[in-house]
């Protein structure tokens, strides 16, 4: 007998283990929560572990506001060896002696802080002509890739023991830690590849809030539901506005209400988390035609009215 799925909404912070693809993690979590709809806010390589925010139901509408968030990682580098893929999934293609100390490491890491360009690796999910680059790489092909601008906002050494270097880094969207590790190895004069990668934070979420699939599997359904964060947690980087019942209903109905006597000035083209009566999350709206006293709101992504109604009338 087929079990009916539940129309739940919320955000699950998963601590993904190594060897599991992001899509597989979504599938397992969806089954454990018996949910109708689920997705993620950006893939985490099977090789990597750590924080993977998953969206259920209406929360998926707001995943886009996480895509540009900075991400924090702890990476372990094997110095003196280069890999064909930049990590342990490839073959060792070059070995060199390691002659570094922590002072040299700190000097080199300082060079990689800030805005720079990075060429995406062949072993990545980026597509060219509709084909993922990693599929071309498996055929022994290499194609030209356009460099992209990234920003390394934090980079520090955690430890250096023999030929193993552990670093913490915070980077912007589109940064490949494998490439960063290889570049650091080259700058140290010995080469390097990743042997471990763990995402520790993203979009205001921390790993301490996350749960593993194994732990989730050992819970009952009430305990699993309690792990879900509200949908607006994905958009917490946006400023918030609170609307009266009439304005909130107009926004939900697709109208563009003009609001006056704002307690805070709104800015043209800026997005806002909108809340109705009793603090119910309505969704994200864009402000326009803003002046000192008035602004027009346009719905960008809205919660289903039934969910808002239930939040207002528990």
Image (spheres, grey):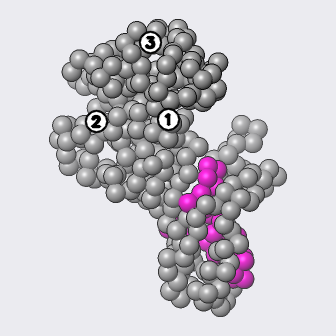
- In the rendered structure, does residue 168 fall within the stretch colored magenta? no
Q: Is residue 217 left or right of residue 304?
A: left
For mark 3, what is the residue? 247
The residue that appears at 54% across and 35% down in the rendered structure is 64
In the rendered view, tell whether residue 192 sits above or below residue 204: below
Image quadrant where residue 179 sits: bottom right
Please give the range of residues in magenta. Answer: 170-197
Can residue 310 be seen in this snapshot? yes
Name the mark on residue 33: 2
Marks 2,1: beta carbons within 8 A? no
Marks 2/1: CA distance? 31 Å
Q: Residue shown at 43%/44% (left/top)?
A: 53
SS of the residue under disc 1: loop
Residue occupying image coordinates x 57% and y 18%: 294
Q: Is residue 299 above or below residue 84?
A: above
Give the residue pinned by disc 1: 239
Give 73 or 125, whichever is nearer the viewer: 73
């Amino acid at each position: 007998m087929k079990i009916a799925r539940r129309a739940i909404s919320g955000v699950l912070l998963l601590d993904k283990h190594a060897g599991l693809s992001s899509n597989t993690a979504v599938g397992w979590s969806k089954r454990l929560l018996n949910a109708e709809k689920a997705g993620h806010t950006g893939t985490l390589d099977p090789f990597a572990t750590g924080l993977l925010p998953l969206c259920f139901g209406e929360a998926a509408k707001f995943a886009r506001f996480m895509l540009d968030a900075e991400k924090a990682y702890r990476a372990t580098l094997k110095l003196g060896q280069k890999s064909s893929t930049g990590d342990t999934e490839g073959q060792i293609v070059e070995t060199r002696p390691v002659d570094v100390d922590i002072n040299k490491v700190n000097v080199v890491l300082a060079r990689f802080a800030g805005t720079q360009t990075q060429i995406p690796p062949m072993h990545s999910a980026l597509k060219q002509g509709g084909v993922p680059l990693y599929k071309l790489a498996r055929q022994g092909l290499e194609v030209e890739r356009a460099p992209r601008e990234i920003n390394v906002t934090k980079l520090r050494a955690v430890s250096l023991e023999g030929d193993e270097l552990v670093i913490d880094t915070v980077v912007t969207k589109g940064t490949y830690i494998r490439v960063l590790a290889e570049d650091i190895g080259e700058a140290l004069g010995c080469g390097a590849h990743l042997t471990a990668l763990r995402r520790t934070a993203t979009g205001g979420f921390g790993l301490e809030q996350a749960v593993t699939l194994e732990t989730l599997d050992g819970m009952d359904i009430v305990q699993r539901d309690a792990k879900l964060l509200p949908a607006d947690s994905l958009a917490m980087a946006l400023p918030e506005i609170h609307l009266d019942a009439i304005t909130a209903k107009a926004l939900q109905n697709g109208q563009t209400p003009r609001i006056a006597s704002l307690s805070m000035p709104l800015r043209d083209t800026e997005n806002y988390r909108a809340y109705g009566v009793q603090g119910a999350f309505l969704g994200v709206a864009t402000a326009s035609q803003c002046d000192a006293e008035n602004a027009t709101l346009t719905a960008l992504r809205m919660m289903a009215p039934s969910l808002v109604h239930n939040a207002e009338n528990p």
